[in-house]
Image (cartoon, rainbow, N blue to C red):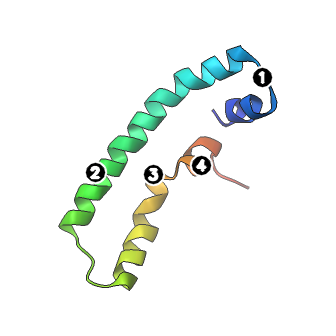
Amino acid sequence: MAELVKAAGSDNNWRTRQSLGQKAGPVIGMVEARALLLRARLLQQKPSTLAELRQWLNKHQAQIDMRALVQGPTT
């Protein structure tokens, strides 16, 4: 999918954009569902300080980072 994102940004090919759109739907749905689950978890595990909130976000936010999910691991 990362290759399609790069190709869509550098090329105006409608087939590339269509293919990317078809693959993006399930990914976006997965991330939205994950975000809802994390929101519910945050309501259950309410941090009492900003430091605890920062620690909680650092632990869980990567699961819904679309940029990292689409591009994959950077090396």
What amino acid type should be assigned to the residue bearing mark 4? Arg
Residues at marks 1 and 3, CA–CA distance in whole angstroms = 28 Å
Compared with 36, 59 (above or below) is below
Q: Position of residue 60 (x, y in %)?
A: 40, 62
Residue shown at 69% from the left, 14% from the top: 15
> For residue 33, which quarter of the picture?
top left
Q: Nearer the viewer, mark 1 or mark 3?
A: 1
Q: Earlier in the sequence, mark 4 or mark 2?
A: 2
As drawn, which residue projects farthest toward the top?
15
Looking at the image, tell me whether mark 4 or mark 1 is earlier in sequence order: 1
**Residue that numbered label 3 is attached to:** 64
Vertical position of residue 60 compared to residue 35: above or below: below
- What amino acid type is highlighted by mark number 3? Ile
Tell me if mark 1 has few (under 14), some (14-19) or many (20+) residues whose alpha carbon lies within 10 angstroms of its own: few
How many numbered marks have been drawn onto this rendered protein structure? 4
| Tag shown at residue 12 | 1
Tell me the residue that label 4 is attached to: 67
Q: Where is residue 41 in the image (x, y as percent from the top left)?
A: 24, 60
Secondary-structure class at tag 2: helix
* Percent position of residue 49, x then y: 31, 85
Q: Earlier in the sequence, mark 1 or mark 3?
A: 1
Image-quadrant location for residue 44 = bottom left
The type of residue carrying mark 1 is Asn
What amino acid type is highlighted by mark number 2? Leu
Q: In which quarter of the image is the N terminus?
A: top right
Label placed on residue 37: 2
Q: To which quarter of the image does residue 9 belong? A: top right
The Cα atoms of the two marked residues, 4 and 2, are separated by 19 Å
Q: Residues under labels 3 and 2: Cα distance? A: 11 Å
